[in-house]
């Protein structure tokens, strides 16, 4: 059986780029038969970035990340959803991998170099980040990892860690493959720039209020060559159409493209339709989020149940790993 695993950063501050690019994937893979899907809020990874970590907010953000993902369609009855720190076997395996991973492999990682260059004091945890990530995946013997292409190098090192282990200690782990959904769009920013990203400030929040979303859509750049309604527009050059294609039915998009190209419809009308179609998708997510926020125990219960199920798998792997690694078995006689 195939097993899907992915890690989710502990932030509830998700935008529609995250949603269309990753979460839709999580939900779809989670629903596919025969694939056990495990999704983990990676709260132990968060403090490796001292600029973003805040002890007052970590718990809240972990809960919020679970809540938003559940609101967006991750159903904890169909997938295992839990917080990384609730399954301590992740860090236990990460330590064993740390002893087996060449330092040079880690200092070469581009994300490490980028992030470290911006810090005055670099936590050793930032260097070990990919090792913990490998442990996250391998402890479940997961073979399919849906992530963005910015994680490619991290997945390579996870495969290397698995390969090295299998050679030295016997076949234990599958080599996990990146699952890049071909249909997952590279969502541009509302400014028409290449990628929607929080650091650029060109996002539409998944739970952003409607007035604020409309203000962003209203000022979205259109085909730059179209100045008056009497000019023909090229939908291929318009970001508005790009967004429309994510949210509206293909038939509606096709009609509007035609009209737009033959000057039959103005940009504002297309934008109003985009707003309408986008809200059809986002409103139910907001409603579910509000309902969960009124009932946070439902999220906490889901995480508790998820951790219990995850731990059963993680424990079995750790037992195998401890033995293969040559550790003294725990003395169990007194328990019998
Ligand atoms: N590094 C991933 C990111 O920044 C998060 C992550 C942590 C992860 N552990 C993982 C992703 C294991 C996939 C599998 O998005």
Image (tube, rainbow, N blue to C red):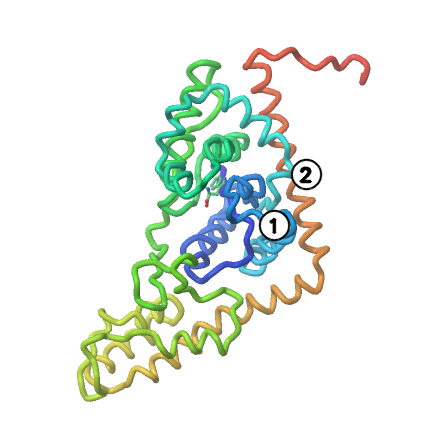
**What residue is rendered at 55% in x and 14% in y?**
324
Most foreground residue, 241 or 143: 241
Relative to the observer, which residue lies in front, 336 or 33?
336
Residue 62 tag number: 1
Q: Are marks 1 and 2 in contact (CB under 8 Å)?
A: no
Question: Which label is found at residue 308?
Answer: 2
Quadrant assignment, res 291: bottom right
Is disc 1's CB within 8 Å of ligand 1?
no
Picture coordinates of residue 211 (x, y %)? 49, 78
Secondary structure state at the residue bearing disc 1: helix
Q: Give the foreground label among 1 and 2.
A: 1
Where is residue 135 drawn, in percent x and y? Answer: 52, 31
Question: Which percent across, then down, holds residue 101?
Answer: 44, 22
Asked whether, in this view, residue 249 is left or right of residue 31, the answer is: left
| In-image side of 318 versus 125 (left or right) | right
Q: Which of the labelled discs sits on residue 5, or is there none?
A: none
For residue 307, above or below residue 68: above
Badge 2, how many Cα within 10 Å: few under 14, some, many 20+? some
Residue at 63 percent across and 38 percent down: it is 85
Mark nearer the N terminus (1 vs 2) = 1
Say above or below: 180 vs 211: above
Q: Quadrant of residue 325?
A: top right
């Amino acid at each position: 059986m195939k097993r899907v695993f992915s890690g989710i950063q502990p932030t509830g501050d998700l935008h529609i780029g995250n949603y269309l690019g990753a979460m839709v994937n999580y939900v779809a893979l989670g629903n596919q038969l025969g694939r056990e899907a495990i999704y983990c809020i990676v709260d132990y990874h968060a403090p490796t970035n001292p600029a973003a970590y805040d002890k007052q907010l970590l718990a809240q953000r972990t809960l919020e990340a679970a809540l938003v993902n559940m609101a967006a369609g991750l159903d904890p009855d169909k997938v295992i959803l839990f917080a990384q720190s609730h399954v301590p076997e992740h860090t236990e395996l990460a330590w064993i991998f740390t002893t087996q991973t060449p330092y040079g492999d880690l200092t070469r990682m581009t994300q490490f170099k980028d992030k470290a260059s911006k810090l005055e004091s670099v936590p050793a945890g930032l260097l070990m980040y990919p090792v913990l990530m490998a442990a996250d995946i391998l402890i479940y013997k997961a073979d399919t990892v849906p992530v963005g292409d910015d994680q490619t190098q991290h997945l390579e090192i996870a495969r290397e860690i698995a390969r090295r282990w299998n050679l030295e200690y016997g076949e234990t782990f599958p080599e996990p493959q990146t699952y890049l959904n071909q249909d997952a769009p590279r969502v541009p920013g509302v400014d028409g720039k290449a990628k929607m990203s929080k650091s650029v400030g060109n996002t539409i929040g998944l739970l952003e209020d409607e007035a604020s979303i409309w203000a962003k859509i209203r000022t979205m750049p259109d085909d730059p060559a179209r100045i008056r309604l009497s000019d023909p527009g090229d939908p291929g050059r318009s970001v508005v159409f790009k967004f429309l294609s994510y949210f509206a039915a293909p038939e509606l998009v096709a009609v509007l493209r035609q009209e737009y190209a033959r000057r039959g419809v103005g940009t504002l009308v297309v934008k109003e339709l985009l707003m309408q179609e986008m809200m059809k998708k986002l409103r139910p997510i907001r409603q579910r989020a509000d309902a969960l926020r009124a009932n946070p125990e439902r999220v906490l219960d889901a995480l508790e149940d998820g951790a219990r199920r995850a731990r059963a798998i993680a424990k079995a792997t750790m037992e195998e790993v401890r033995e293969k690694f040559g550790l003294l078995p725990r003395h169990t006689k007194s328990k019998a």
